Image (spheres, rainbow, N blue to C red):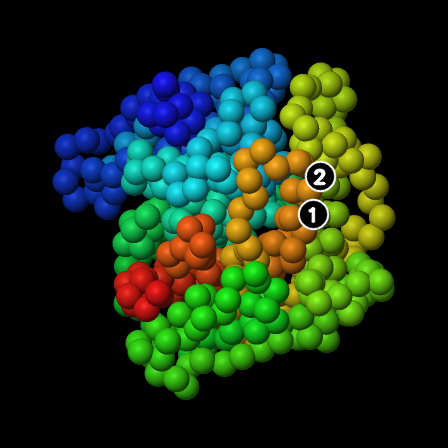
Amino acid sequence: MIKSLDYGAFMEKFSLQLSPSQHQLPLRGLTFAVKDIFDIEGYVTGFGNPDWARTHSAATSTAPAVMDLLTAGATCLGKTVMDEMAYCMYGVNKHYGTPTNPCVPDRVPGGSSSGSAVAVAAKLVDFSLGTDTGASVRVPASYCGILGFRPSLGAVSTVGVLPMSQSYDTVVSHLGWFARDPMILNRVGRVLLHLPDVDPIKPSQIIIAEDCFRLSTIPSDRTAQVLVKSIEKLFGAQCVKHVILGDHVKDKVPSLQHFMDKGNEDQEDDIPSLAALSSAMRLLQRYEFKNYHAKWVTKVNPDFGPGISERIWDAIKATGENIDFCHSVRTELRAALTALLGDHGILALPTTPGEPPKVQANPATSDIFFSRPFSLLSVAGSSGFCQVSIPLGRYDNVPLAISLVAKHGSDAFLLNLVETLYDTLQETI
């Protein structure tokens, strides 16, 4: 009965508010929830696993990112369910249950920020906080039909947030947030990023990653063409450019040769250079997860769910081989994408290449299912660029989304662009 009321989104509910009487506060009257990876004073940060909660004490302070939202007038209504140790993108948790996707209840909500996405999609809160290591805001936003924003690397304080891995997680780089309304997405972003109000800037170019859209199982007239028509209406056809992103990355990121699968270079269901990019990103994540958490995992031997257990123990066994090349890939990719986009350029690609899997899907088949999304998600994931996932209605009754990526430090520009573009996109669907 409880799950039917809150869609299984919450770990625990409370009401936390500061300065309720100040009318001028930017988030006054808005409610939010936070993923159970953020410290809130007096509460145990559970990290999605009961053994973690059992072996850790209550937080003695509140994460600065949460405090910023409270200080801006918003009210926190609770902590949300997440995948164990943030090490999955399905949104499944064997201990606390899988939050129900309000858009398609028989499909996973996406993870690891599953409860935070569901709370927004189900209109239980106005916005919510998650983290995004490999995809943990962008995927659930796409699957639940809401907006999801992942800021630039180093843009927000990571103090008081449990790390999944150092380079990729850090709320610093990868706290993310969800909203249904682009104006609220923007207002929350300005608070978290400590940004002043600035006028929107017209994009110099919006580059369609043609090969990435071909990777998608969704017809391009429901994704890329909707964006192109909207851009032409708002900014003119001269803004629209096209690129074969995989070729650009292959040419400009030479360190990827260490991660290329020679047997897959001619496959039509993948983009070899982006698959290599994904491999490099996941290798570094595993290595850093081990550095952070191996001691606790080996000492406690926690009870993990199927699929999660195998991935975590694989990470514990990770070696440092090729780690230096991972860092080279990131540096080269950022330079390559910065040159491609220039000032106020945007890269457009699908958030994910297909529909979310069924809730009861076999974990092994789900791993195969998620290999292609990582190829797309690693573009911003490895470069540290900011990215927003924007809902585009439904196709075959399943939510659709498109993503826009902007260069590092262009968060205000991207948030303003989403607010400008959103209504036209919805009208064009």
Q: Position of residue 188 (x, y in %)?
A: 33, 47
Q: Position of residue 57 (x, y in %)?
A: 54, 15
Local packing at callout 2 (Cα closer than 10 Å; few below 14, some 14-19, many 20+) is: few
Residue found 29% across the figure and 24% down from its top: 15
From the viewer's perspective, is residue 204 above or below residue 396? below
Rendering quarter of residue 178: top left
Residue found 23% across the figure and 46% down from its top: 26
Amino acid marked by disc 2: Ala
Local packing at callout 1 (Cα closer than 10 Å; few below 14, some 14-19, many 20+) is: few
| Front one among 329 and 370 | 370
Residue 317 is marked as none
User: Is there any visible trace of residue 327 in the rendered image?
Assistant: no
From the viewer's perspective, is residue 41 above or below residue 270? above
Q: CB of mark 1 within 8 Å of CB of mark 2?
A: yes
Mark 1 sits on what residue?
368
Distance between mark 1 and mark 2 Cα atoms? 7 Å
Amino acid marked by disc 1: Ile
The secondary element bearing badge 1 is classed as helix
Q: Residue furthest top?
A: 54
Residue found 28% across the figure and 32% down from its top: 75
The secondary element bearing badge 2 is classed as helix
Mark 2 sits on what residue?
364
Q: Position of residue 125 (x, y in %)?
A: 31, 36
Q: Residue furthest front?
A: 396
